[in-house]
Image (spheres, rainbow, N blue to C red):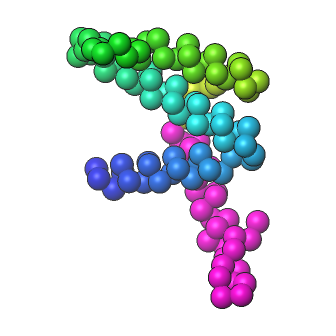
Amino acid sequence: MLLRGALENFATGLWLLDGAGRIERRRRALSLWDEDMRNRQQHETDTAHLLSGGGMTGAKRPAKIRALVDQLGLAPLTALRPHQILLTATRALARCARLTWVSGGCECSR
């Protein structure tokens, strides 16, 4: 179970950083945040959790995230697909595993 959590987090990090450009990386980060808020909303519902201190609930936060997506002119967010994240991360890792040594250091060959 511990290994699965580590692999999921590692794959998610690679997926976030491997976007084709800044716009895609922003969109991926906001998609992840949106999914996190969906999970938070589910937790709040399941546990009847009431916020204190004036924070936003998981139900209200997605609207703010989507407003930011619109403000940045990004494509609409889509639901995260864990298998797609893992496949993308695997491809990114495979690219970086083909290292070429240059001047005592290494650089990914793309």
Which residue appears at 44% of the width and 21% of the height?
38
Q: Is residue 109 above or below residue 6?
A: below
Choose top left, top right, bottom left or bottom right for residue 47. Answer: top left
Horizontal and vertical percent for residue 31? 58, 30
- Tell me what residue is drawn at x 53 percent, y 42 percent: 83
User: Can you see residue 36?
Assistant: yes
Q: Quadrant of residue 72?
A: top right
Query: Magenta segment, which residues?
Result: 82-110
Q: For the view shown, which residue lies furthest in the front direction?
A: 53
Numbered circles on residues, count:
0
Residue 6 on the magenta segment = no
Question: Is residue 83 inside the magenta stretch?
Answer: yes
Considering only vertical position in the picture, is 34 above or below 91? above
Task: Work out which residue is located at the far bottom of the displayed protein and give it.
Answer: 104
Percent x, y for residue 27? Answer: 66, 33
Residue 41 in view: no
The residue depicted at 57 percent of the width and 26 percent of the height is 79
| 30 on left or right of 38 | right
Question: Could you tell me which residue is drawn at 72 percent across and 43 percent down?
Answer: 22
Q: Is residue 103 above or below residue 18?
A: below
Q: Position of residue 34 (x, y in %)?
A: 52, 25
